Structure formats: structure tokens, C-alpha cells
């Protein structure tokens, strides 16, 4: 089979939500696809700092991180879009006025407002990532430090709607459900990361296969004809894809790759 480009979301696609279990069938399918000579990429909202070791150990060809803002191929950094420190300070200062749970995601670090350190979502997220977030005050104290994106909890109040509208001036806002919003740099997405790599590698969008399960995968799933929704995907995501495979824990990745003749 001609060499293809395969792009995988992480949570709910490669590993289970919450427990973060990696099915053995997924590990096997990735190994077989690599042996067939395909390019395999993680395409994630996570920044490089937040990639799980169990994922990086699988030997992917590269990574599209931060929803298209940071791209690697064979260990080489091909693209990096960073916010400037003044905007980072402005946004963090505004969010601080509202005292809502938030994580600011940088390439090499994770920051939070330590006044919200005991919030259950903050503690649960740190535990899941295995990372203790640094205090966002470091951004104010060192002008060389920045973040690339953020995730914030905004309960449906009039005050929080005001904050969401402010953030939407600077970021694309993705509703992840349960009052959680992912704020990414405008002009970037998981789809722009795919298009960048297609151009760099001299491939077409028809050479690509994408695997996802949630709203922050929508851009890449809609951009590629060969789009695969996991069986455990949100229903709104399944309806946008060309193929729906089994649940992650029912060998969904392996079965989809077999279906398309990728392994």
C-alpha cells in the first residue's frame, strides 16, 4: 500500500478517558502500521509537556501539539507559534479577576492560578497528567515565559459569559462539555497541522486518515475524507465522519486500520 499519513487524538482515542489505559490492540496496530511504512502522528490539544510517556514510547513519526501550534517530525521542530508575554499577562490578569479554575498550557510547563489550587477539577487534572502546575505569577515575573493555550472552567453565569466573550476576542473557544472550554490560538487547529504536514511531505489530504472522538477533533475530522470516529465518540462527532469504528476498549483503532487496509 502507498505510504499514508495517520493522525490520532489521544484521550478517548489512543487511551481511555480518566484511567488513561492504552489497549494492547492499539499498540499492536501502531507497530504494524509503522512496519508498513506509514507516517503516524499524534494530533492533540495537549502541549508537548503534557504528552503521556506511554504515548511517546510508541515511536510516532511526529506530533501536532496545541491544536496545530507546535509541530514535530522525527524529533525536528517544524513549526512553533507562541503568544507574546504581554498578551499572556493581560489575559491571565483578566481571568484572575474572575477567580475561575484554569490551566495555562506552555510548551515546556503547565501553569495555574494557585488561589484555585484546591478546586477539585484542578487537583483531578494535575493527578491525571502527573504534573504539578507552576504558579501563573511566574509569567508576570519573567518576560521570557509564555503559554500557548488555556483550558478554563466557566459555569453558566452572566459573569462567566462576560469572561468568555473577552477570551473569544483572542482565542478560538471550543466547548469540551461539563463547563470546560479550550482556548486555542486563532488561525490554528488540528486541521491546519495536517495541511502543514501534507505540504511539507508532498502528500495530499486524500493520503490522510484521522482518528478522533470529541469536539476538539472536529476540525481535522471535517478536513479529511478518511475520518474515523471511535465508537465511544460523541454522537455529534460520529455524524461528521466517514466511518465509525468500535469503542476504544473494543479494539476500535485496530479494527479501523484493518478496515481501511492500513495494516
Image (cartoon, rainbow, N blue to C red):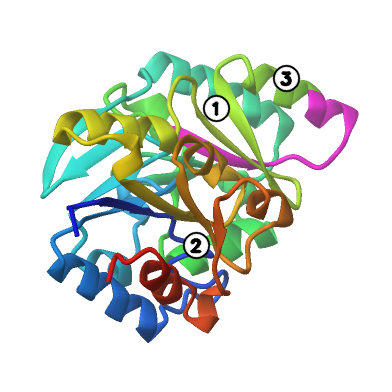
Q: Based on the displayed image, in which of its 4 quarters is residue 155 positioned?
A: top right
Q: Is residue 5 left or right of residue 173?
A: left
Q: CA distance from mark 3 to mark 1?
A: 15 Å
Q: In screen coordinates, is 99 left or right of 114?
A: right
Q: Which residue is mark 2?
A: 11
Q: Residue at the location (56% across, 69% down)? A: 17
Q: Nearer the viewer, mark 3 or mark 1?
A: 3
- One can see residue 107 in this view: no
Question: How many C-alpha atoms fall within 10 Å of the one at disc 2: few (<14), some, or many (≥20)?
Answer: many
**Front label number (2 vs 3):** 2
Place of residue 129 in the rendered image (x, y in percent of width and height, measured from the top left): 44, 63
What residue is pinned by disc 1?
92
Q: Nearer the viewer, mark 1 or mark 2?
A: 2
The residue identified by callout 3 is 165
Report the label total: 3
Mark 3 or mark 1: name the one nearer the start of the chain.
1
Mark sitting earlier along the chain (2/3): 2
Q: Are marks 1 and 2 in contact (CB under 8 Å)?
A: no
Amino acid at each position: 500500500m502507498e505510504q499514508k499519513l495517520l493522525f490520532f487524538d489521544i484521550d478517548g482515542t489512543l487511551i481511555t478517558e480518566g484511567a488513561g489505559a492504552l489497549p494492547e490492540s492499539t499498540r499492536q496496530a501502531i507497530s504494524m502500521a509503522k512496519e508498513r511504512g506509514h507516517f503516524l502522528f499524534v494530533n492533540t490539544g495537549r502541549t508537548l509537556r503534557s504528552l503521556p510517556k506511554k504515548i511517546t514510547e510508541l515511536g510516532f513519526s511526529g506530533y501536532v501539539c496545541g491544536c496545530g501550534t507546535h509541530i514535530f517530525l522525527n524529533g525536528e521542530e517544524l513549526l512553533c507559534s507562541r503568544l507574546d508575554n504581554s498578551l499572556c499577562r493581560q489575559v491571565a490578569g483578566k481571568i484572575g479577576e474572575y477567580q475561575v479554575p484554569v490551566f495555562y498550557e506552555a510548551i515546556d510547563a503547565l501553569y495555574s492560578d494557585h488561589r484555585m489550587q484546591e478546586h477539585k477539577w484542578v487537583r483531578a487534572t494535575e493527578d491525571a497528567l502527573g504534573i504539578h502546575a507552576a504558579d501563573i505569577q511566574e509569567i508576570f515575573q519573567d518576560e521570557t515565559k509564555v503559554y500557548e493555550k488555556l483550558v478554563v472552567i466557566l459555569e453558566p453565569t452572566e459573569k462567566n459569559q462576560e469572561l468568555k466573550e473577552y477570551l473569544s476576542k483572542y482565542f478560538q473557544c471550543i466547548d469540551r462539555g461539563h463547563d470546560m472550554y479550550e482556548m486555542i490560538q486563532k488561525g490554528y487547529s488540528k486541521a491546519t497541522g495536517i495541511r502543514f504536514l501534507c505540504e511539507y511531505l508532498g502528500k495530499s489530504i486524500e493520503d490522510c486518515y484521522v482518528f478522533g472522538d470529541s469536539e476538539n477533533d472536529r476540525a481535522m475530522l471535517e478536513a479529511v475524507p478518511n475520518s474515523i470516529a471511535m465508537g465511544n465518540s460523541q454522537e455529534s462527532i460520529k455524524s461528521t465522519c466517514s466511518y465509525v469504528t468500535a469503542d476504544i476498549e473494543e479494539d476500535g483503532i485496530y479494527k479501523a486500520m484493518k478496515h481501511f487496509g492500513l495494516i
